[in-house]
Structure formats: structure tokens, C-alpha cells
Image (cartoon, helix red, strand yellow):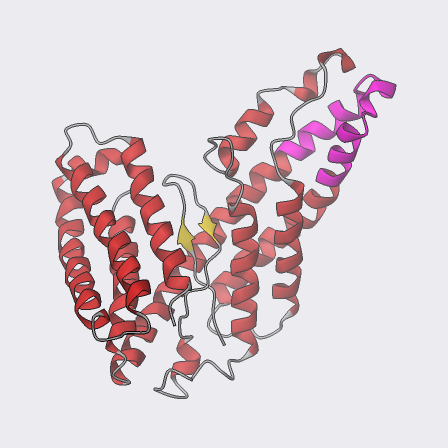
């Protein structure tokens, strides 16, 4: 079975874009040391995939220069619809995306219906909390969206809109908290699975694929070492980051070397190495700057995202 794996988007926002990097579930590796161990994966892996889809669905709320759900909710709240006097203010902007929320809730429903939590008990608990709030939030979001798009507010002078606003804002605030918690659980599970995959690939002499997986591991760990741009001025933080950068550079070199002898897949692995090399460049830019910027930080994460998307296409 192919497991989904989380990737990051803009730093400071707990979001994960859709990715299909092949990773090995720890419990499947216990059954076999070959790269085919995931073919008969248990239900726990179906649960994990459903949860990644659920997380990724709402993590896709990036458009118009926004920084994810918290930014969108801030923009929605700024309209202060709960205290709107009448319908004379025109149509409000619905920043929070109901379709993405529906996709998330649908995937959560599938995940929580699978009884076997396997190695994902913590993730399962986080997902159930997200689902418990997400279902009623979806109903309310649909109601508010229909109310606004049908311009029903012109008939009741926005009375119902004022009533729906407080629970809508509270529901989204809670959903964002649940989403963050689920993201942390997904990252923990994904890292364990990635480490297991590397060991399995090395054991099977699949060194090119192992080196590519290592680039994803070290780049993810490197990003985890920093929470905000100012961290790159911290000697303690860079003391953690620099060894990871060296490991990442070594893995990139291995990918380059091994890809030369793989005529069928060389271009894909070279593209991955290109993105990872640029990621290192952004890391070093941030570290050398007197005033590391959020823009440079976001570009570091964007390059990581691009590398993951390239890895999706690798055999």
C-alpha cells in the first residue's frame, strides 16, 4: 500500500499539502524487509491515509496571498458580522472554504470508521476530536454559505447572519486547534515511517531510493529546528541545523551520483536534488542574513514542498 505523507506549507501555519511519497508502515516492516511489504497493509494504514487526506484538504486553504486558515479566519472576523446593523453593508466575504471543509470531514468520517488504530492511537484521538467539531461546523458553514450566496440576508436584514456568526467563528477557531494537534501527530507518524523505509531500502540495496528518502528526512528535520526567521540568528538553533544541513548535502551528492547510472529515472531524481540544493541555499541565506525575513523563510518551506511533489513522481 502507498501511504500518504505530510509536507509543510508556509512556516508558522500548521498546514500540510497533499503528498503521495511512498513510505513504509512500521508494522508492515515487521512482516518483511522487502520494498513490497506494504502491498497487504492492514486497516490501520487505510486509517492513516484517510487522516492525511483530511488534514491536507483544509491545509489547501492558500489563495490570494493568505497564510492558511488562521489568516483567513482573521479576515473573516474583521468583518464583525455579529454586530452588523443591517443588510445595507453588502455581501460579506466568506473566506473559509466550505468545499475543503467538506472534503476533510468526509475523509475523517472514513478514518474514524476504521476500528484498528494500530500504531496510530495518538493520531486517531486527534482525528476524532477534529471530526467531532468538524461535522457540526460543516453543517453551519453550508447554512451560512447558502444564506449569503442566495442573498437571503436581503429579506431578514441580516438577522440570521448575526446569529450564525459567533458559533461559526468559534467552530473554526476550535477546528484550527484540532487541525494543529492532528498535524503534530501526523508528523510523528510520518517520520517514524520514513525512517523505517530508509532502513528497508538500504537492506534491499535500493540505494538511490534510500538516498532520496534521506533527503526528505534530513530536510524535514532541518526545518523542524527553526520556528521563526529570528531563530537563524540563534547559535543554539544553528548548532542543530548545521549538522542536518551537512547530512542533507551528503544525501544530495549520493542522489546525484547514483542517478547517473539510472537511465530511466535520472531526470526525476536530479530534479529532486535540484530542489534540495536550492533548499540548502535558502537555509544558508537565512543563516547569513543579519535580519532573516519571513519571505525567505516561506521560500525555504516552498522549496521543501516542491521537492515533495517531485518525490511523488519517483518510482
Q: Is residue 8 visible?
A: yes
Instruction: Tell whether 218 sits left or right of 143.
Output: left
Please provide the residue range marked out in magenta. 141-169
Instruction: Tell whether 7 sits left or right of 71.
Output: left
Q: Is residue 99 above or below residue 80?
A: below
Q: Position of residue 99 (x, y in %)?
A: 66, 45
Residue drawn at x 29%, y 38% is 297
Single out the residue that lies furthest toward the right: 155
**Most common secondary structure along the magenta stretch:** helix
Instruction: Tell whether 66 sits left or right of 273.
Output: right
Q: Is residue 109 above or below residue 145?
A: below
Quadrant hosting residue 79: top right
Residue drawn at x 28%, y 80% is 206
Task: Count numbered badges in the picture.
Answer: 0
In-front residue for pair 288/83: 288
* 164 in the magenta segment: yes
Q: Quadrant of the C terminus?
A: bottom left
Residue drawn at x 25%, y 83% is 205
Residue drawn at x 39%, y 85% is 30
Quadrant hosting residue 6: bottom left
Q: Position of residue 31 (x, y in %)?
A: 41, 88
Q: Is residue 228 visible?
A: no
Q: Position of residue 141 (x, y in %)?
A: 71, 39
Q: Position of residue 295 (x, y in %)?
A: 31, 32
Quadrant hosting residue 82: top right
In-front residue for pair 226/92: 92
* 221 in the magenta segment: no
In-front residue for pair 281/165: 281
Single out the residue that lies furthest toward the front: 263
In-front residue for pair 294/282: 282
Amino acid at each position: 500500500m502507498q501511504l500518504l505523507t505530510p509536507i509543510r506549507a508556509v512556516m508558522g501555519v500548521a498546514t500540510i499539502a497533499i503528498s503521495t511519497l511512498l513510505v513504509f508502515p512500521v508494522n508492515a516492516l515487521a512482516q518483511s524487509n522487502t520494498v513490497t511489504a506494504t502491498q497487504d497493509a492492514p486497516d490501520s494504514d487505510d486509517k492513516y491515509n484517510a487522516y492525511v487526506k483530511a488534514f491536507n484538504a483544509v491545509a489547501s486553504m492558500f489563495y490570494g496571498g493568505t497564510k492558511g486558515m488562521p489568516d483567513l479566519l482573521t479576515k473573516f472576523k474583521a468583518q464583525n458580522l455579529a454586530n452588523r446593523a443591517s443588510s445595507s453593508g453588502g455581501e460579506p466575504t466568506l473566506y473559509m472554504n466550505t468545499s475543503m471543509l467538506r472534503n476533510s470531514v468526509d475523509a475523517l468520517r472514513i478514518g474514524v470508521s476504521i476500528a484498528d488504530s494500530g500504531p496510530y492511537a495518538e493520531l486517531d484521538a486527534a482525528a476524532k476530536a477534529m471530526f467531532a467539531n468538524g461535522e457540526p461546523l460543516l453543517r453551519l458553514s453550508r447554512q451560512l454559505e447558502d444564506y449569503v450566496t442566495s442573498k437571503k440576508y436581503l429579506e431578514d436584514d441580516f438577522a440570521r447572519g448575526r446569529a450564525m456568526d459567533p458559533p461559526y467563528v468559534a467552530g473554526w477557531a476550535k477546528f484550527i486547534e484540532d487541525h494543529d494537534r492532528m498535524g503534530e501527530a501526523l508528523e510523528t507518524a510520518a517520520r517514524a515511517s520514513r525512517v523505517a523505509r530508509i532502513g528497508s531500502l538500504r537492506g534491499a540495496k535500493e540505494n538511490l531510493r534510500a538516498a532520496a528518502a534521506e533527503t526528505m528526512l534530513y530536510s524535514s528535520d532541518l526545518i523542524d529546528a527553526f520556528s521563526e526567521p529570528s531563530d537563524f540568528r540563534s547559535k543554539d538553533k544553528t548548532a542543530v541545523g548545521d549538522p542536518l544541513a551537512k547530512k542533507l548535502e551528503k544525501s544530495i551528492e549520493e542522489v546525484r551520483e547514483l542517478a547517473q547510472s539510472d537511465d530511466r529515472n535520472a531526470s526525476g531524481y536530479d530534479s529532486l536534488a535540484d530542489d534540495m540544493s536550492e533548499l540548502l541555499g535558502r537555509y544558508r541565506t537565512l543563516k547569513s542574513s543579519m535580519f532573516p525575513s519571513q519571505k525567505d523563510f516561506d521560500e525555504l518551506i516552498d522549496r521543501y514542498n516542491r521537492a515533495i511533489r517531485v518525490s511523488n513522481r519517483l518510482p
